[in-house]
Amino acid sequence: MSKKKKHRNKRVNSLNHPILGKWKEKELMREKTDREYQVFIDSLPKLAANWDRNARAPRPEKVPEIKTKKQSKPKKPAMKTPKVADSQGAVFEDVQFETPPMTPDLPPREIIAVAPNNNKKDDDFWNFYDQGLPSIR
């Protein structure tokens, strides 16, 4: 009989690999934490209803309607029509309309005389300015 060699999966031992080992270690730690957290969640008491599920909301009480008087709309004041006397005895005066006079034009402005031009001080300044700076020596 021939001996059969058992076929083993040749996987890279990731724990011995310098980079993959750290990744694998983190993944294993995460899986372990997930399992522990799931056990903790399963151990918590289940939430249950603590009220009567068949209870119904109370019916609202009927509020008696308060009857209010309808406010009438305010009446518009009736326009008084002048009473006309009998057509035989009515006497109308002739009315003459006069147009008011137009607004008068404004009076012309006064012309103000300008003082004579005395620039002696100004001329003195420019004569001084034109002299230039005195020499330092």
Image: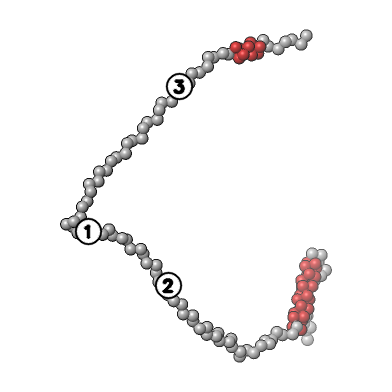
Apparent side of residue 102 relative to residue 21 in the rendered image (left or right): left
What is the x, y in percent for residue 96? Answer: 25, 43
First in sequence: mark 2 vs mark 3: 2
Within 10 angstroms of label 1, few (less than 14), some, or many (20 or more) residues? few
Residue 14 shows in the view? no
Within 10 angstroms of label 2, few (less than 14), some, or many (20 or more) residues? few
Task: Find disc 2 in the rendering and name its residue.
Answer: 71
The local secondary structure at tag 1 comes to loop
What is the x, y in percent for residue 48? Answer: 69, 86
Kindly report the distance in space between the C-alpha atoms of the residues bearing marks 2 and 3: 73 Å
Residue in view at x 74 percent, y 10 percent: 135
The local secondary structure at tag 2 comes to loop
Apparent side of residue 68 relative to residue 35 in the rendered image (left or right): left
Within 10 angstroms of label 3, few (less than 14), some, or many (20 or more) residues? few
Task: Find disc 1 in the rendering and name its residue.
Answer: 85
Q: Amino acid at mark 2?
A: Gln
Residue in view at x 22 percent, y 46 percent: 94
